[in-house]
Image (cartoon, helix red, strand yellow):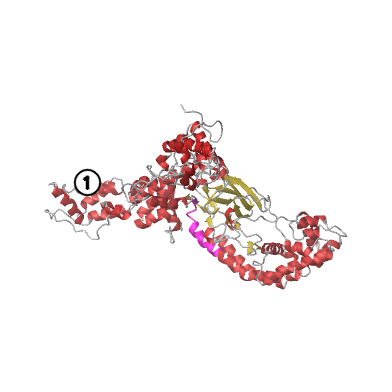
Amino acid sequence: MRTAPFVPRSGKRPASRRVVLLLGLSCLLGGGSVSAADAAADLEFFEKRVRPLLVERCYKCHSATGEKVKGGLLMDSREELLKGGDTGPALVPGNPEKSLLIEAIHYTNEDLKMPPKTRLPASEVADLTAWVKAGAVWPASAVAKAGPAKGVFDVKKRKQEHWAWAPVPAAVKAPVVSDTRWPAGDVDRFILARLEAKKLQPAAPAEKAALLRRAHFDLTGLPPKPAEVETFLADTAPQAFAKVVDGLLASPHFGERWARHWLDSVRYGETRGHEFDHNIPNAYQYRDYVIRALNADVPYDQFLTEHVAGDLVPTPRLTADGANESVLGTGFWFLGEEVHSPVDIRQDECDRLDNRLDTMAKTFLGLTVACARCHDHKFDAISQKDYYGMMGFLVSSSYRQVRFESIEHHKRVAAQLDGIRTKSQAELPMKFAAAVRPGVEKMAAQLLAARHQPTDATAPWVSELTKAQADPLHPLHAFAVLPAGAGGQAVPSLEAWRKSLERPVFAPEDVVVDYTRTPAKHWYQDGFSFGLRPAQTGEFRIGGSAAQPLPGFVAEAGAWWDDAWKVLQVAGSEKDVGALAQGERGERTLRTPEFTMKTGRLWYLVKGTGRVYSAVNSHLIIAGPLHGAVTKDLGRETQWRWVEHNLSRYPGHRTHVEFTPTGPGEFAVAMVVQTDPKAAKPTPVNSRLATALGDGTDSPEKIAGALQGVFLGVLEQLKGQRLAAAPDAEEAARLADWLAKNIGLFCAPNSPERVAFDRALQPLAQQRDEQIAQIKANSKTAPA
């Protein structure tokens, strides 16, 4: 029976000390100054309680003399513990709460439990904790010598050790046989040579009816029809059998017959197994793809490429209707078992990916590679490094239901729309500035007239000022809230407006993605609904239709959903199981890069109506009680706001985030961050207006004049194409967008300037309408 834990430097000390312990005090590595008696007691505690425990419980996996070093951690010396392993230093002397060693033995961290299979007795946990708290003293001694060095994995040597790895000779000479009449070709000579070596005779030639039956069953799995038998028996031409074989190879039943063998290899099934055996949505599309590929005699190297990365093929195979065949090959990755609510989501992902990699290797390499999951393969030329290199390929991939019937066509439509988008930036901003300038030059007079002497002519301005009174973000708000007779006295409402909140600034390591500055390499989406690139501040955009185009400017850079794609629908296809079935996701999804969550809390700066899915460890079936938090409804507010996503169960887990619009209105994403933005609702800063308006003590006349001056400054930047480069580009773009949306306040439809602008706008709006009309609303989907 173990005695109660001995706590160093506390309680009653033994009266005597061994001389040998006193002589070793100068060799202690503990920190701080302690008395000789205390140091000796600590050393005695280590040798009697701690070292035997480490040897018995830890050295099998964490000693240079053990079977194998795991986690990169050695525990043969204090230095090794301070150095730590793959997860960092294992020891913080004097501080058990910050020591990973103590955290591991307390079993408080689901991902860090040591020993991994059984907990230490409470007395041993107390001994180790007391030892660390006392400074983790350890006598100086030679570090344990490493055992035999691990052999370097030599792929070349492995390949030389087995015939299966040797290259096939360029030319192999057929063997010489005694019976030269029987062989019909070199293959027969190889067969006959082995038969003759065993003193065996080849079987007699099959009768024609038997030969026909065998060919039919082998190639199509179906017996020949009576009429086909009669025809073949009556055909005495030398090429009669070859003609039959050609016909069978051309039969659609050939692909159906041989696809069954291939589908067995890739563990084809239409459900995910486990407890509820959920459907794999549209798995049959992969089955039919295999049948078509075999019947089309697709070259094997292309067939393989389509399976491994069919979505990345530069020139995919297309059907007569333009459907993408190549992308369907990637569906085989997602045919395995999926658990709907795994307790250990990280382990579940490892098992799923191992199954996919195992299936790929067996199918395409004829090898089992599962051994390399834990160590270099003992026999085959498969290293652990190669295994996890391939695993990295799978980890970097993600699942979707691809609209394979329309995606290639839409790629061309998206390219055309992007070209129109580029053309619109060339001259439309300048022509717009010229069109509204005469009206802006009269803006102050119009504002004062609407304030003092409203008439039918100023009714639109009166209406706009009424709206501005209730909207602090309206550019005319400062003028609209001035009470009658104001002048020479600060206005409280104006002062409050001037103190707008700024958006927070984040450390680079806290930013998952910033779509206001996103490079092309981080622009990922399923489809093209968010365009081929993020929208930039000040970018001119065309809305509405050619019959009634609506000009505008992008006030806030980010990933903006183009509602031209709102017509997309899934036709004749199953939806995903569980939470991913909510809303239309095909060709509508924006995806962030992969990242590791630090705290398990994410914040999204979004606008409009949408949903978000955080693909924690690529978990798909969100239908159980444990992981429903990975999806979230973002709400329906039309203003920019920060939305928190609480994923506090998953710090340290790998994920990416997918955004999908769910409403008819606009939807945009600006940022994803991992730190609290401390701003519930970011309010745009109009420092340009605030600076121009001063402290609000001036008369309405001066404020109206200041507003006019601000807008004239914006027009000058548009004219010189300098708006996007301005330090306050976002504020200027917001003002330009307000001008565009209220173009009727500043120029009549038949004014020369407006006519010139419309003449430049109309052709591009017409081209945009023509491309939008090409969008295929309906498409089937398949796993990819």
Q: Which of 434 and 36 is in front in this view?
A: 36
In the picture, measured across the screen, residue 241 lies left or right of residue 711, that is left
In the rendered image, which residue does mark 1 sit on?
Answer: 210
Residue at the outermost top position: 1
In the picture, measured across the screen, residue 689 lies left or right of residue 722, that is right
In the picture, measured across the screen, residue 552 lies left or right of residue 220, that is right
Characterize the magenta stretch by its predominant secondary structure: helix
Where in the figure is residue 131, as x and y percent of width and height? Answer: 51, 38
* Mark 1 surroundings within 10 Å by alpha-carbon count, few (fewer than 14), some (14 through 19), many (20 or more): few
**Amino acid type at image mark 1:** Ala
Where in the figure is residue 100, as x and y percent of width and height? Answer: 51, 42
In the picture, measured across the screen, residue 473 lies left or right of residue 600, that is right
Where in the figure is residue 329, as x and y percent of width and height? Answer: 42, 52
Q: Which residue is drawn at 75% across and 60% down?
A: 475
State the SS at label 1.
Answer: helix
The answer to which quarter of the image holds residue 438 is bottom right
Does the image show residue 224? no
Q: Is residue 493 above or below residue 551?
A: above
Q: Which of 100 and 32 is in front in this view?
A: 32
Q: Which residue is drawn at 67% across and 65% down?
A: 727
Give the mark count: 1
Q: Is 406 covered by the magenta stretch?
A: yes
Where in the figure is residue 180, as x and y percent of width and height? Answer: 13, 55
Q: Which of 471 and 650 is in front in this view?
A: 650
The answer to which quarter of the image holds residue 711 is bottom right
Does the image show residue 151? yes
Residue at the outermost right position: 485
Segment colored magenta:
400-417
Q: Which residue is drawn at 66% across and 71% down?
A: 430
Q: Is residue 21 above or below residue 739?
A: above
